[in-house]
């Protein structure tokens, strides 16, 4: 899969670990920065990742900051993006099974690199379950439309 990957200064070191994990699994990476641990603003890098997914240029996005929160808050502003903060394995699995999350965000100050690698594996490999969950995602898209968003 093609995966857009981004971070702020807090997620900079973990981004490299995630990039290696993705590359080893055969995924193509669009590295959206940041490229150093110099202080920067998370909305900028979250938007870069989310824009790729919203525009269909990447099938998935992964964005890392200190907690995962700012990245998800930003990414969810873009049409068609379903970003999930996953700092544990259960949430990672169910964000795919039930929510068909297309952007994963993680907190580099919350989890270590070993857990992050496991989360990435699970999140990349778990399919969407469909069925009753598709209806709920249709309702979610409806909410987005009602409040000014458009389909990606
Ligand atoms: C940066 O200090 C921190 O606020 C940021 O990485 C993130 O956790 C925001 O949600």
Image: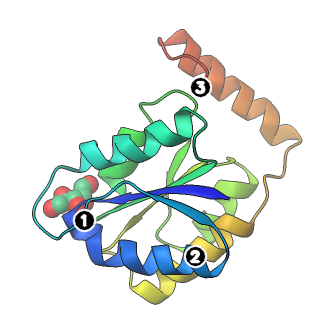
Graded by Cα atoms within 10 Å as few (under 14), some (14 to 19) or many (20 or more), the crowding at tag 2 reads few
| Residue under the point 30% across and 49% down | 45
* Rendered view: 63 above or below 44: below
Please tell me which residue lies in front, 3 or 138: 3
Considering the numbered disc 2 on the image, is that residue within a helix, a strand or a loop? Answer: helix
Residue 81 shows in this picture? no
Nearer to us of marks 3 and 2 is 2
- Snapshot quadrant of residue 125: bottom right
Q: Earlier in the sequence, mark 1 or mark 3?
A: 1
How many marks are shown on the rendered structure?
Answer: 3
Graded by Cα atoms within 10 Å as few (under 14), some (14 to 19) or many (20 or more), the crowding at tag 1 reads some
User: Marks 1 and 3, Cα distance to the nearest angstrom?
Assistant: 28 Å
User: Marks 3 and 2, Cα distance to the nearest angstrom?
Assistant: 27 Å
Residue 144 shows in this picture? yes
* Rendered view: 34 above or below 75: below
Query: Mark 2: is the Cβ under 8 angstroms from ligand 1?
Result: no
Residue 27 is situated, as x and y percent measured from the top left of the image, at 64, 67
Q: Quadrant of ligand 1?
A: bottom left
Q: Earlier in the sequence, mark 3 or mark 2?
A: 2
Residue receiving disc 1: 35
Query: Mark 1: is the Cβ under 8 angstroms from ligand 1?
Result: no
Tags 1 and 3 in contact by the CB under 8 Å rule?
no
Q: Is residue 36 left or right of residue 21?
A: left
| Residue under the point 34% across and 53% down | 69
* Rendered view: 55 above or below 96: above
User: Marks 2 and 1, Cα distance to the nearest angstrom?
Assistant: 18 Å
| Residue under the point 47% across and 11% down | 148
Tags 2 and 1 in contact by the CB under 8 Å rule?
no
| Residue under the point 47% across and 73% down | 19
What is the number of the mark on residue 152?
A: 3
What is the number of the mark on residue 23?
A: 2
Residue 9 is situated, as x and y percent measured from the top left of the image, at 20, 65
């Amino acid at each position: 899969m093609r995966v857009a990957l981004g971070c702020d200064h807090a997620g900079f070191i973990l981004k490299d670990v995630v990039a290696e994990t993705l590359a080893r699994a055969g995924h193509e990476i669009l590295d959206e920065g940041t490229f150093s641990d110099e202080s920067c603003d998370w909305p900028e890098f979250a938007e870069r990742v989310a824009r790729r997914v919203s525009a269909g240029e990447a099938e998935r996005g992964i964005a890392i900051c200190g907690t995962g929160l700012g990245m998800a808050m930003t990414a969810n502003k873009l049409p068609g993006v379903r970003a999930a903060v996953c700092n544990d394995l259960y949430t990672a699995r169910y964000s795919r099974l039930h929510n068909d999350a297309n952007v994963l965000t993680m907190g580099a100050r919350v989890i270590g690199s070993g857990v992050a690698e496991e989360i990435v594996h699970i999140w990349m490999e778990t399919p969407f379950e469909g069925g009753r969950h598709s209806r709920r995602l249709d309702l979610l898209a409806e909410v987005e439309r009602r409040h000014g968003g458009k389909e990606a």
